[in-house]
Image (spheres, rainbow, N blue to C red):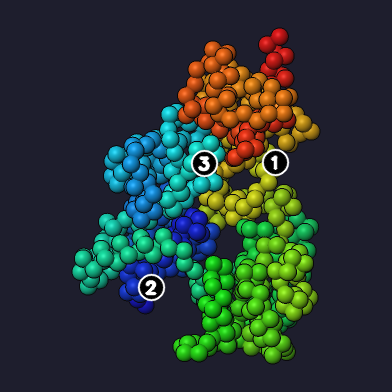
Amino acid sequence: MDKRLFIIGIQEENLGSLRKQMEYIFGGRMPVIGVTLKDLTHGAISPGDVVLLSSYEIGEIVKPFLPESCEVIVSRRTVNIVKLKNIITMQKTSKFMVVNDNPAATLETIEDLENVLPDHDFLPYMAHEPMPENFDFIITPGEANLVPTKAYQTFDIGARVVSIETVMELKEIFELEMKDSLLMQYYIKTMVHLTAKRSENTPVSIADQNKNRTFSGISTESPQMQSTIRIASQMAKTSNIIHITGETGTGKQMLAEMIHNDSAYHDMPFYIYSGADKDPQSIDNELFGGEGEKHQGILREVNRGTVYIKNIDSIPYQLQNKLANYFDANAGSSDVRIVTSSIDDLWELYKGDIISQKLYSYLSSYILKVPSISERKEDIPVLIDDFKNHFNRTEMQFSERVMNAFVRYDWPGNVRELYNLISYCVCLNQKYVEIDSLPIFFKGLENDYDNRAEDGFLDTEAVINKIEKHGFLSESIQLLNIYEQGKKENASYGRGKVRRLLLEEGIKMTDQQLRLRIGILDELELLNVRIGRAGTTISEKGEKFLEEMNESRG
């Protein structure tokens, strides 16, 4: 077996970017396989393989899965300089607050930025600490969801890429006969390639999937999930077209794999296809083939396998009937099993003229709905135990406060978001996880001090503590008083007006300082910050907080 490069990471999107970079640079000179921690299994990696870790933090976690003789290196990451074009062309020296998913990565990002942009200043944002003051912009390497305030222009420079030093190291390990100048040329082209908006969806064989995903491996206490699994198991025994709906991160692809593995097609290939971000001609050629094409199209080339078409609503309307005609022509055939999926409800897609009537008629007979975590809160402890078992960290425990935060949280990213959070906690190497250890990307912390969970209850002390971390409680109260007065007068105030009103009260504040304070009050939901003429207004929660503060001051 040829020596393979295994890239191991936590998040699928980031892992996909690293894999594409290596494939583009080395041009097929070695097999490149990307695998997330949750999909890593014993025996998947052979003694002669090379393992590239996305970060130092996962080293101890993956060690039990690796043969002793395989070579392991940790990727050095750097910013994609092509993504910095808008900042490089800035005439004025500026200050940027840098936001990343953990302190170490934040400082590494700043080091990279300082090397490329020495004329600018970069300040780290650290979770549970006051934001730095007097900055002009925010910059983040693909972590825009972690930005703590909307009051500043944010530059998202995309996920950091593998450094040229790591690429050179891989060249030596694989003993590749490539000139360094050629390798550097490919490396630079890759920066542009990753920046351009391209389709990343190509058919993927079951060899790259998890054959061990079966219905018997699902642990659930949720009646909804139990019903979905029971019905899916029955449908798997047929050759009928199956459609799966569910929110992002609920596990639609995992369910499709289980259906394949429990069907008569389990020994055949499993293909994943998505038309997202592809033009109609490309989708037509990839699914059905075309004149002058080397292949006949996925649907014709697959022989007794399963084709999983994800995001079926991304297929252009004009091609949906062509797909329906294919289903019609192959009715009763057992050559190919079709499973499709969508985030939105199929009926709603049909009513919105996003799915054609003809295609709807084929997809609507056998529908499975994967419930969101918010619909199966009883499964949160079960899922956590599964993830701990996977990482061989069964001794890790969470405090009652943490578990309460988990249950209150809505989990918009569903199982994927919960998995990412537990992966982070595993990397901390702590046996007992308290609320302060949770990362900034866990937005459930916001519910620790807001008033949504309990019938209008407002934890005033928690809000005060949050504001006082930034050191401007009295100024915040005065700000809320100003916005409350504006609401009574049915007027929305711009920052210039607010600064003048503050000055009348003896509070002098720069525009940067005002934006920082408004951002914190917006984060705490005491203000409703809107862009444009609508302006900023005090929220009901802000009014309630202000009333309690004024009463306490007598």
Q: Is residue 99 visible?
A: no
Amino acid on which disc 3 is placed? Val
Q: CA distance from mark 2 to mark 3?
A: 37 Å
Q: Is residue 481 visible?
A: yes
Query: Which residue is depicted at the point 74% across and 65% down?
Result: 352
Residue placed under numbered mark 3 in the picture: 147
Query: Which residue is depicted at the point 28% across and 41% down?
Result: 118
| Percent of width and height locating residue 314 | 62, 69
Q: Considering only vertical position in the picture, is 433 above or below 30? A: above
Horizontally, residue 355 falls left or right of residue 513, namely right
Q: Earlier in the sequence, mark 1 or mark 3?
A: 3
| Percent of width and height locating residue 335 | 64, 88
The quarter of the displayed image where residue 135 is located: top left
How packed mark 3 is, by other alpha carbons closer than 10 Å (few <14, some 14-19, many 20 or more), is many
429, 425: nearer the viewer: 425
Could you say whether the residue bearing mark 1 is in a helix, strand or loop?
Answer: helix
Quarter of the picture holding the C terminus: top right
Q: Which mark is residue 31?
A: 2
Horizontally, residue 105 falls left or right of residue 411, namely left
